[in-house]
Image (cartoon, rainbow, N blue to C red):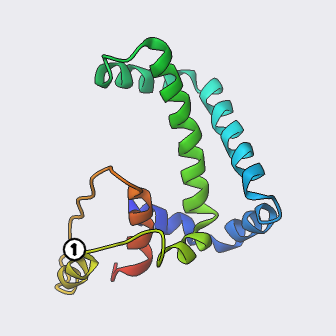
Amino acid sequence: MYSWIEKVTKNDRLLLAINKLCKYLPRPLLLIILSLIGLLIYSCMRSVRKQITLHMRELLHEKSVLSIGQTCRDYFRNLIIVLYEIMIDYRFLEGLQKGRFKVEGDGFLDEALQHGRGAIVFSPHIGNFFYYYWYLSKNTLV
């Protein structure tokens, strides 16, 4: 996945243009706009929404239908915000790297990649694992 993120974030011309437009918006307003886009996608992509809701019901069987519906809406909203951060606002992540996120163990990956055979990265989906994908795409020998 992080190699896909690297490819997407390499289209600097388009992403920089969007970044320039968005940097004039106050961050709270931008988050509201991104949240509304997420809710619009939630509303329009009925088949995807149904599939995600079914998966959530299967995993969160103790939750009510209303709670699962809210979690599904939150999923779409957060997905759009994360995609914005990774694809457009990733230059902002570089400033956060030293203070907000702590990455450990990347030296082991660099060492494995020096042998020229590739490596498999296992990253549990806890914390901001998308940030780690971005970090890997920018900081490894890949």
Point out residue 28 in the picture as x, y percentages from the top left corner: 73, 52
Residue 16, above or below 68: below
Report the side of 56 relative to 6 (left or right): left
Q: Is residue 96 left or right of residue 28?
A: left
- Front residue of 13/71: it is 71
Q: Say above or below: 30 vs 90.
A: above
The residue sitting at 47% across, 79% down in the picture is 98
At x 38%, y 19%, the residue is 54
What quarter of the picture does the C terminus occupy? bottom left
Identity of the amino acid at label 1? Answer: Gly
Residue underneath mark 1? 118
Q: Nearer the viewer, residue 87 or 103?
A: 103
**Looking at the image, which residue sits at the far top?**
65
Residue 61: x and y, percent?
31, 17
Relative height, residue 34 to residue 135 (above, below): above
Q: Which structural element holds mark 1?
A: loop
